[in-house]
Amino acid sequence: MRQKLRHANYAPDLVEVVIADFGERGLQSDDRFAEVFSRSRRNRGYGPYRIRQDLRQRGICAEEATCGADQDWDALLELTYGRKFGDLPPQTPEERARRERFLLRRGFSGDQIRRLFHRLRETVGEK
């Protein structure tokens, strides 16, 4: 909100006064914004690192933000992967690297991605 008001050429002092007033009256809450924003991003298949980064860019302290600590990130990662690539593991190292880059940009960790590929290989091996 601060950035939008400043880009609209409002005086920085006035912006801070208005935001403080809104906060006191319960009309503006960084916590509420972070919760709604995080839920929206999770629903679109974004991981915890990307959500925190996007919140920081919007001036919200990522440590205070609820990125869904109780969220099952591995399940979200599988869902995101499945929507984009199906349920088969990559067949070549180049394809694996391309898929890893996609998932990293979405905000998932390298460990999460490695676990996903391991589960995919196990699933294919069982069939």
Image: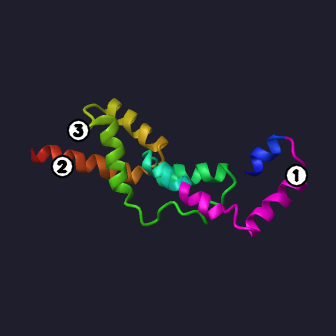
- In-front residue for pair 92/102: 102
Q: Amino acid at mark 2?
A: Glu
Dot 1 or dot 3: first in sequence order is 1
Q: Residues within 10 Å of mark 3 (few under 14, many from 20)?
A: few
Of discs 1 and 2, which sits in the foreground?
Answer: 1
Q: Is residue 72 left or right of residue 18?
A: left
Q: Which residue is mark 2?
A: 122
Q: Amino acid at mark 1?
A: Pro
Label 1 – label 3 distance at C-alpha: 53 Å
Q: Position of residue 71 (x, y in %)?
A: 41, 62
Q: Position of residue 74 (x, y in %)?
A: 35, 55
Which residue is rendered at x = 49% and y = 50% of the image? 40
Q: Is residue 23 left or right of residue 62?
A: right
Q: Are marks 2 and 3 in contact (CB under 8 Å)?
A: no
Q: Residues within 10 Å of mark 2 (few under 14, many from 20)?
A: few
106 in magenta:
no
Q: Which residue is mark 3?
A: 88
Label 1 – label 2 distance at C-alpha: 57 Å
Which residue is rendered at x = 88% and y = 51% of the image? 12
Q: Is residue 3 left or right of residue 68?
A: right
In the displayed structure, would residue 42 be above or below residue 72? Answer: above
Q: In the current view of this chain or complex, which residue is farthest to the left?
A: 127
Q: Amino acid at mark 3?
A: Leu
Q: Which residue is mark 1?
A: 12
Of helix, strand and loop, which one carries label 1?
A: helix
Predominant SS of the magenta segment: helix
Magenta segment: 9-36
Label 2 – label 3 distance at C-alpha: 10 Å
Which residue is rendered at x = 28% and y = 31% of the image? 92
- In-front residue for pair 88/8: 8
Q: Position of residue 83 (x, y in %)?
A: 32, 39
